[in-house]
Each structure stands twice: as C-alpha cells, then as structure tokens.
Image (tube, helix red, strand yellow):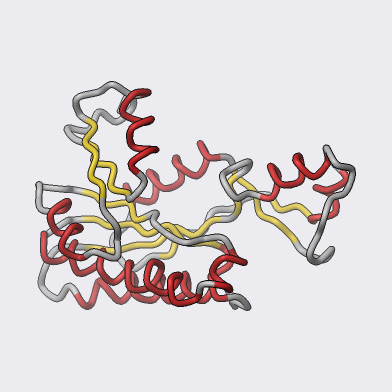
Amino acid sequence: LRRHNPRRLIVFSRDELKQSEMSSQYADPRLRFFVGDVRDPGRLRRAFEASVDLVVHAAALKQVPACEYNPFEAIKTNVLGAQNVIDAAIDCGVPKVVALSTDKAVNPINLYGATKLCAEKLFVQGNTYAGARSTRFGCVRYGNVLGSRGSVIPVFLEQRRHGRVTVTDSRMTRFWLTLEQGVEFVIRCVEVMQGGEIFVPRIPSMKIMDLVEA
C-alpha cells in the first residue's frame, strides 16, 4: 500500500479472524476484504469482476503431513482451487495472474509437492487455455520462508525448551528466504512476466543438521 499505491487491494481468504485483525492493523480505505474460498468458483468470479489487474494466488494446504492424511482436501484446494482461479481470471479478463509454488514441486515424493506440481502445470497451460483472451499466467517457485507459520524454526524453538529436537531425515536440505525477500521477488516477477514462466530465485541453502545445531 505504501510503496506501490494501488487503487484497491482485495484480500480474499476464508479466515475472517485474520481479515478482522488485518483491517484493524491497516486502517486504509483502499483495502477490501472478501471472505471466500478458492474451492468456490462463483465467489472467485464475484471477487475478480471488479476491474482486477493482478491476482496473486497464494491459497494452499501446505502442511506435508496434513496433506498426506487428508489427500482429498489437498486436491480440492491445491489442484481444483487452482483451476477455479484460472477459469475465473479468464472469464473476468484479469490481465495477470501469478501462482505461488514451492521447491517441493520438483520431483515430488509427497502429495503436497504433487499437488503443487499439478497446479504449476495448470497455470503454465492456462496461457493456451485462455485462447484469444489477454489473461496471462505465471508461477513463482521458492523455498521456505524464514519463521513463517508452519516453518520448522518455530517448531525447533519450541522443542528446544523441552530439550529434544526431532528431525525426520538428517540428509535434508532447506532453501531459505525472508518474507520480505519473497514479497519483493513476487513483485519483480509480476513486472517482467509475459506468461508461461516458472520463476525460481537464487537463494541460500542449509543442511538441516546445521540448522538444528545453530
């Protein structure tokens, strides 16, 4: 809002508590809040039809164990939800749509990674699916956001209090960036995208055991 001065910024999510907290923290008339779910194509169309120039699609079920235990729900949100965003954007003439993906989409071995790989394929192919319409789709694929909700660092910090830190596989590597770096990367990609790209930043990696020791 401060740096890019949009005429209107719509927050579309199903979490009314976070929306309420955000509206209190950022009392700005340019902010609009839509309670809705990417699983609901009609609600997406209603949100997109108000002369929207850009959509950043960040909705996902992204906890690996939760997706393994609830595979149908993961597919409904991560795959069918992505299709709904594509359809609504094309129908409403949104010029640019960027989907946030993950490094886990590369050669996935779990359902979460597989659903995000599928979403990437849908978004890249969405450029052909749009036909003669002007909507263009791209993907941004990065790693773990440092200290974000669901990140391993808050888990490790909590476990440290009890003296026992758990690691699933000591051979794991993590790619890290801060929330601010992630936002800046998305904005840069939006500015240069032509449609069909999967943007991957150069970001530092860390062995999981080095992180545990630190």
Residue 143: quarter of image: bottom right
Q: Residue at x 43, y 60 (%)?
A: 60
The picture places residue 81, in percent across and down from the top left corner, at 32, 67
Residue 123 appears left or right of 113: left
Q: Residue at x 38, y 51 (%)?
A: 189
Residue 2: quarter of image: top left
The picture places residue 160, in percent across and down from the top left corner, at 83, 41
Q: Residue at x 43, y 71 (%)?
A: 73
Q: Is residue 113 above or below residue 93?
A: below
The picture places residue 195, in percent across and down from the top left corner, at 29, 64
Q: Nearer the viewer, residue 101 or 133?
A: 101
Residue 143 appears left or right of 158: left
Q: Nearer the viewer, residue 78 or 177?
A: 78
Q: Nearer the viewer, residue 100 or 190?
A: 100
Residue 82 appears left or right of 211: left
Q: Quadrant of the N terminus?
A: top left
Q: Quadrant of the C terminus?
A: top right
Q: How many marks?
A: 0
Q: Is residue 2 above or below residue 129?
A: above
The picture places residue 164, in percent across and down from the top left corner, at 88, 49
Q: Is residue 3 above or below residue 133?
A: above
Residue 50 appears left or right of 137: left
Q: Is residue 92 above or below residue 18?
A: below
Q: Nearer the viewer, residue 65 or 81?
A: 65
